[in-house]
């Protein structure tokens, strides 16, 4: 097996709390996973699930209670490894007395780049994140979205092998999100490994080779988005139309009392008649289509419906909440 | 070492852009006013008044900057999370800490040098020339700078593990205690038990001795300051700052940045 870009073994983090810090709250429990070289890995989970804790442990901002992690085969305690990693913090905030160009120049100096190359990279990164005209404005005047872009620029400024982004789409408008997605895909094309945490499941589905879902500090599933939710279709969706109808007519399946597994989702009046969307079980498809044709409906489309990452995610979150509630009740 | 210098220069830029050096305008106005007024209200002791006033102002302004900015340097970086992106670069926590220390000491050096120049200008105004004995003023200014470096190191140490407010209180408390170490050593034996006296004596050696840095009276009266005192104070400040920064680095290197 090839060396993992990020390898986490049994990583656990407890945060002390209370007046004397004697009590402990477990934020991350026995996390074990790998991020392979060159892949885009999405780290999903609700607020407080342990995503940022994991990322902060990897960067060395906090220290593990137990377990180990390695990035590019080097332990996370080894600061020299930071030459090869880029990191965007969640809701980044930078020195507001600096301009974006000065900030990038400051950070670039830690990578000991020659002066000319440093200047060239700063200019290139500002252009890449769409801030070439705002590079000389102090960061105190930047919007949240602009700070996010600066954050992304500083994360990839030194051409790192592994890029770790904590909620990179947060605070961005649709254009900004699209640009960030493009940058992430470009990093992958350049052979870089990208790990990012997000709440926005559609982004994860669209971008990620694999995702890990973490709930309540525990990893609940890892795999390709398709794999993780199961490739089995959950049903078929039929879009059909009654030409010339006013919309008062019921579709055939409903007229016949509703076949099992058939669900009418939506009806909408159009210029030519009334359009319906119906969800049916896969084994009911042909029967329903026959009925629709016999009733004079025009079939517009038939689509396979798969479980979405969101449904999988919500299922895990609800299961975790139910488990927590059960523990609370049994505790009482 | 390069990374320490990078952090130090950025700290200097931060303090300058935060308009901290505007205090120089206040100092310049104070010196001008003092130089004009002193001739009218004092006869024969103009030098003493100007030097005492000038050195006191340099010391107080420097102390305010050292305590408040020294404490704020670390806590602000943590509170605003500006430190997160920085520590993801190949920079060690001790390098960041020493860089911050060096940056503030550099700022204080520039500030103190500018104020010292203002004080000398005021002396030129009242004496019409500088005298050889005015060299002691420069030595007094150097001692103030050493004292300020020590205060910055104390402020950094406290700010590494407690809240800014407590760090300010602890730093100010330690500074005040450090002004009385000689008195602690000379307490009369009949006023307390021998154990307490021995304890206080030990404590007096552990506390930073700020009394040694106060040569204001010698400078005002143009008394010679021995070279051995300069060497001794320099070595003491370097050693003490080294110990404080090492302790701060050990604490800060183990701290979770939540």
Image (spheres, rainbow, N blue to C red):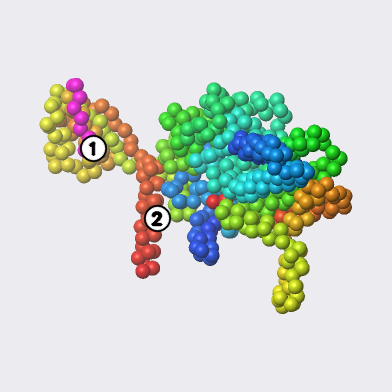
Is B221 contained in the magenta span? Answer: no
What is the x, y in percent for residue A146?
A: 50, 31
SS for tag 2? Answer: helix
A216 or A63, which is in the foreground? Answer: A63
- The main secondary structure of the magenta stretch is strand
What residue is shown at x 57% (from left), y 52% (from top)? B164
Q: How crowded is mark 2: few (under 14 residues within 10 Å), some or many (20 or more)?
A: some
Q: Residue A205 carries which label?
A: none
Residue A284, quarter of picture = top left
Distance (Cα) linking label 1 and label 2: 29 Å
B128 or B62, which is in the foreground? Answer: B128
B155 or A260, which is in the foreground? Answer: B155
Mark 1 and mark 2 on one chain: yes
Residue behind mark 1: A265
Quadrant of image for the C terminus of chain A: bottom left
Q: In the figure, is residue B72 to the left or right of B225? A: left
Magenta stretch: give its range. Answer: A264-272
Can residue A138 be seen by looking at this rendering?
yes
Confirm or deny contact between disc 1 and disc 2 (CB under 8 A).
no
Chain of the residue that carries numbered disc 1 in the rendered image: A
Can residue A5 be seen by looking at this rendering?
no
What is the x, y in percent for residue B109?
A: 73, 41
Q: Earlier in the sequence, mark 1 or mark 2?
A: 1
Q: Which of marks 1 and 2 is in front?
A: 2
What residue is shown at x 85% (from left), y 43% (from top)? B133
| B208 vs A282: above or below | below
What residue is shown at x 37% (from left), y 49% (from top)? A315
A253 or A154, which is in the foreground? Answer: A154
What is the x, y in percent for residue B228?
A: 87, 52
Chain of the residue that carries numbered disc 2 in the rendered image: A
Residue behind mark 2: A320
What residue is shown at x 70% (from left), y 45% (from top)? B53
């Amino acid at each position: 097996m090839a060396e993992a870009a990020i390898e986490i073994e049994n990583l656990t983090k407890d945060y002390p709390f209370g007046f004397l810090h004697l009590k402990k709250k477990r934020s991350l429990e026995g996390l074990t996973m790998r991020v392979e070289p060159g892949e885009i890995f999405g780290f999903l989970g609700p607020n407080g699930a342990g995503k940022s804790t994991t990322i902060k442990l990897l960067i060395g901002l906090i220290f593990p209670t137990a377990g180990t992690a390695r990035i590019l085969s080097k332990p996370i305690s080894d600061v020299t490894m930071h030459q090869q990693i880029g990191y965007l913090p969640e809701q980044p905030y930078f020195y507001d007395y600096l301009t974006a160009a000065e900030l990038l120049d400051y950070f670039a100096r830690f990578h000991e780049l020659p002066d000319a190359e440093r200047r060239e990279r700063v200019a290139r990164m500002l252009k890449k994140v769409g801030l070439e005209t705002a590079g000389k404005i102090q960061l105190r005047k930047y919007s949240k979205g602009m700070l996010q872009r600066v954050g992304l620029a500083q994360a990839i400024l030194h051409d790192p092998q592994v890029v770790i982004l904590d909620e990179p789409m947060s605070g961005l408008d649709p254009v900004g999100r699209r640009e960030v997605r493009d940058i992430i895909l470009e990093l992958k094309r350049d052979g870089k490994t990208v790990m990012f945490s997000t709440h926005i499941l559609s982004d994860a589905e669209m971008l990620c080779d694999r995702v890990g879902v973490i709930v309540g500090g525990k990893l609940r599933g890892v795999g390709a988005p398709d794999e993780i939710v199961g490739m089995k279709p959950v049903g078929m969706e039929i879009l059909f139309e009654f030409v010339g109808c006013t919309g008062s007519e019921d579709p055939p399946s409903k007229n016949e009392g509703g076949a099992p597994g058939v669900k009418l989702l939506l009806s909408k009046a159009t210029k030519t008649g009334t359009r319906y969307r119906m969800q049916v079980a896969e084994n009911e498809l042909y029967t329903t289509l026959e009925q629709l044709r016999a009733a004079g409906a025009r079939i517009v489309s038939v689509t396979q419906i798969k479980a979405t990452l969101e449904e999988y995610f919500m299922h895990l979150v609800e299961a975790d909440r139910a488990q927590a509630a059960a523990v609370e009740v049994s505790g009482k | 070492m390069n990374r320490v210098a990078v952090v130090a220069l950025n700290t200097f830029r931060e303090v300058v852009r935060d308009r901290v050096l505007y205090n120089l305008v206040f100092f310049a106005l104070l010196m001008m006013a003092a130089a004009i007024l002193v001739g009218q209200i004092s006869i024969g002791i103009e030098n003493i008044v100007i030097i005492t006033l000038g050195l006191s102002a340099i010391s107080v302004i420097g102390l305010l900057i050292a305590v408040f900015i020294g404490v704020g340097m670390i806590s602000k970086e943590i509170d605003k999370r500006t430190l997160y992106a920085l520590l993801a670069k190949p920079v060690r926590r001790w390098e960041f800490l020493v860089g911050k220390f060096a940056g503030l000491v550099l700022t204080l050096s520039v500030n103190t040098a500018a104020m010292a120049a203002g004080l000398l200008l005021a002396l030129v105004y009242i004496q019409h020339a500088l005298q050889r004995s005015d060299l002691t003023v420069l030595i007094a200014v150097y001692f103030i700078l050493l004292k300020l470096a020590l205060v910055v190191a104390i402020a950094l140490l406290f700010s590494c593990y407690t809240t800014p407010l407590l760090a300010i209180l602890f730093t100010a408390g330690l500074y005040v205690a450090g002004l009385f170490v000689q008195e602690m050593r000379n307490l009369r034996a009949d006023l307390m038990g021998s154990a307490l006296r021995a304890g206080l004596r030990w404590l007096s050696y552990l506390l930073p001795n700020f009394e040694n840095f106060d040569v204001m009276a010698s400078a005002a009266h143009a008394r010679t300051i021995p070279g051995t005192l300069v060497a001794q104070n320099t070595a003491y400040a370097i050693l003490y700052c080294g110990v404080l920064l090492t302790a701060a680095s050990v604490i800060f290197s183990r701290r979770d940045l939540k």
